[in-house]
Amino acid sequence: MGNVSGNTYGLTILSPIIEDNSLEICHSMELRWYLSRLPRDQGSPFAQLSSTYLARLVVMDDVVFVGLPACEEHLKSRYLVFETNFDGDLDTYLRRMATETREFVDAVWGHCAGFPGTGDVGAFVSYMKKCQVETTFFFADVNDGSVESTLEALRTQSELAHFMEKHQGTPAAELQREFGRFLERLRKTPSLPRGGDGSQDIPQERRPHD
Amino acid sequence: MTKIDVSDIQGFALKGYNFPHARYLLLELGEAQAARAFLLKLLDVITTGERWDVNKKPMSTVNIAFAYRGLIQLGLPLASLLSFPLEFQQGMRARSDILGDTGKNGPQNWDIVWRGSHVHAWLGVNARSPGALEDCCSDMMRLIAETRGARVLETQDACAISVGGKFSTQEHFGYTDGFGNPDFKGAERGYVPGQGKLDELGNWQPLATGEFLLGYADEAGELAAAPIPHLLGRNGTFMVYRKLHQNVAAYRSYLDEKGAQYAGGKEKLAAKFVGRWRDGTPLELSPDQPDAAIVADDDQNTNFTYGDDPAGTRCPLGAHIRRVHPRDSFGFNGGLVNRRRIMRRGLPYGEYIPEGQPVKDSDDRGIIFMVLNASIFRQFEFVQQQWIEYGNDAHQGNDKDLLLGNHEGRGKFVVQGTTDPKNPPFICGGLPNFVELRGGDYFFMPSLTALAMMATNSVDPR
Amino acid sequence: MTNINGKAYAMNAITPMKPWKTPILKLIFFILGAWKAKQKDLKNLSFIHFARWVCIRRTEFPRLSDQQPAEDLRYDYLLFFSNFNGTWNQYIDAFSAVLYQGLDLIWRWSERYPGSRPVTGFKRYISLVQFDTDYYYNVYPYSATNDVKAALRVRDALERFAGTSQSLSTAEFEKAWLEFQIAVAPDLGSTGIAPVGT
């Protein structure tokens, strides 16, 4: 099935954005504004939707004119593109969107035509499936784990490297004990925060070329 | 078959002279007419790429290259100026974020001459003896005075390190340098296996000329971006100049400390940092001890691949030479490597203190490191940003090159190992900056034709 | 810059296709799906977390209400979404250099596609058809796909070793610890921020 690779699901949704000429600020503009202020790190609604690896929201204004001899044409509506890659099945994910990230879903899809709200979870799931487009080809480099186990693995890798460096030259008996303690600590260490905690970021002003 | 006109190309771009003495004059150009008059006189003495007869090697050589501001000062037409690649127009200082030249390596720590915008040109003099160097430099000073075409902001001396009474290719950390400069089509010197690119049969072939000279096809089957008109760029190239201060005391004490903990011993650990023993023997060919015979044999000393060492147990995955010249380690027939090669020139500067004698990091010593390539962005900047200051392509995450990386006290380097007690896995943490950038810039090294056009104010941009 | 989150870059591209070409492309994707060797190339390139292609036929743009006008299009559209590591230039250089056949096979059906070699014209086309991301979330911003794969290998090795480590004798532990270190030593790179995009 085009949307699935191993444990991972690749969801692509195109939701037409409401056109309303009577508004002072149109829906697509409000939507962009909202998205620009939405946190992208551990404060993101997708951190809450914990099975999400990478997700994007794009306001697609129009198709592209590639130049003669191609013909110029235009879309009659703008579309909100939602591309997400997550563990597990589609229904669970959509249901969780409606129940665990209601405010975000309402704020975003409230600008889209035919959105039934998040009050009726079933109606929301049907709405999203109506907007779903079939992925023709989906590639996933790593598709057999889960977000949780991946974050744990990343934490483990970094803790282990520190342990190994610190205990170079430690005699075997003592090392064995220390390693036992290390494993204990590792079990209790929380894995990396989903979305990152911004601790390693450089402020945008100092990254002028991005 | 590429036929290149060696009499039109500056010798510095085509070959390493292997002269032990050098002085780089950093010039601010005078008013345009005077500067052009200076260039006109210089044309008579610029060293080209023509081959020297066996007993007729000159005692000294002269070459020139221009920073973007120098080209503006010379009065090149606006359309030509704007056609130069963007990174060259911006200059190296403006690209510090991209290159990782921040913190200790940031422009605020550079030599004063490099912090301003006055370095317009680089005049490179190489010589076989101190006397020849002085003679040639006085000639240059005379030309400058006669024409009033420039002002010398600063001179930078460099000199090969003398070991056992003979000039060597060693640098201040004790490594023998100078292997692996890329072979390219049309260059007249003999090709050395390991310096070019690998073909499908595993043989070494020279790289496309256009990787190192403008106006020729490059490895992607295109001409690299070059200024207009065509004659301005053709047979020219771009040069990156970086003054790399070396913290020899920090290096020696780090090596002593970690070398004592490493079961293979200090010399082997030093070899693991780089991928070659300090005498130049490649670890891939001789993992257990240095081998002078291999070093002396051009058919061997850079003739190896990493295909048999995927786990880095002979040459660590993050070792310096493996990072900057991955050879076959990315697969795909070298497609990811062949457009990232750089031609290196350079000489050490400052007093050499042999091992065992006291040395201070505050002393002025290091290496003047110059890179020649057709595209600064695609070649030098890429290697610097992705392979030196980052480790993803080497599968080493964010770990930086041990010798050149801007670690700021926090870096680490992993030595992969085996069950051989002399070759254990080992982690070197707490890396300081062994090398600090003290200045530099991007330069354009024109052909003789282009120099003549510039000197006679006849650059016509269409 | 909203196309980037940590080490990942979100590229979106849309290209028009004459409708009679779409079934050909779908067939090609079907074959690619079964052609594991070509996918192995993508995995070995190790640049991409997730990527997908979506063919939208001209009548298939979702329509949710009668107020929304129906689309009246001449072309079908190929949408491409990639989550990759590295800079924009590095990514395109790499694909143009080593996977040009695959790229051409997929995009030759799109109007005005110039081919993936030489790369300069290809980059110009991509700039034309690429559109920017408004919001990008990355669960592990400090980890490239290489980092993730390395971490998974380390975790697996640790699980195998940890199980027995405490019950071994000291001498056995010493030997096992050495073997464990050897196994994980290639995969201990640190994670962190990405180099500046260029």
Image (cartoon, helix red, strand yellow):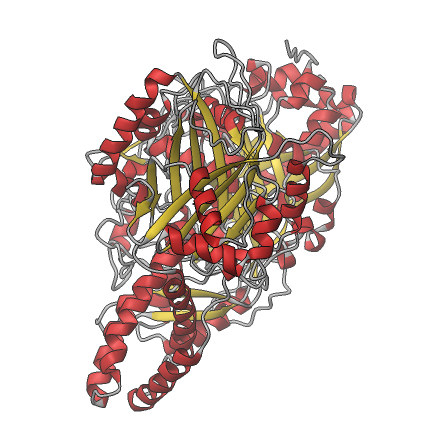
Q: Nearer the viewer, residue C78 or B288?
A: C78
**Vertical side of B42 occupied by A169: above or below:** below
Q: Where is residue B135 in the image (x, y as percent from the top left)?
A: 63, 36
Q: Quadrant of residue A87?
A: bottom left
Q: Nearer the viewer, residue A154 or B275?
A: A154
Q: Position of residue A197 (x, y in %)?
A: 57, 64
Q: Give the number of marks.
A: 0
Q: Quadrant of residue C25?
A: top left
Q: Which of A193 and B299 is in front in this view?
A: A193
Q: Position of residue B90 (x, y in %)?
A: 66, 35
Where, quadrant-wise, is the N terminus of chain B in this rendering? top left
Q: Where is residue A111 in the image (x, y as percent from the top left)?
A: 61, 41
Where, quadrant-wise, is the C terminus of chain B in this rendering? top right
Residue at figure coordinates x 64%, y 42% from the top left: A31
**Vertical side of A55 occupied by B83: above or below:** above
Residue at figure coordinates x 66%, y 47% from the top left: A34
Q: In which quarter of the image is residue B316?
A: bottom left
Residue C196: in sight, yes or no?
Answer: yes
Q: Nearer the viewer, residue B61 or B14?
A: B14
Q: In this view, does C117 lie to the left or right of B281?
A: right
Residue B318: in sight, yes or no?
Answer: no
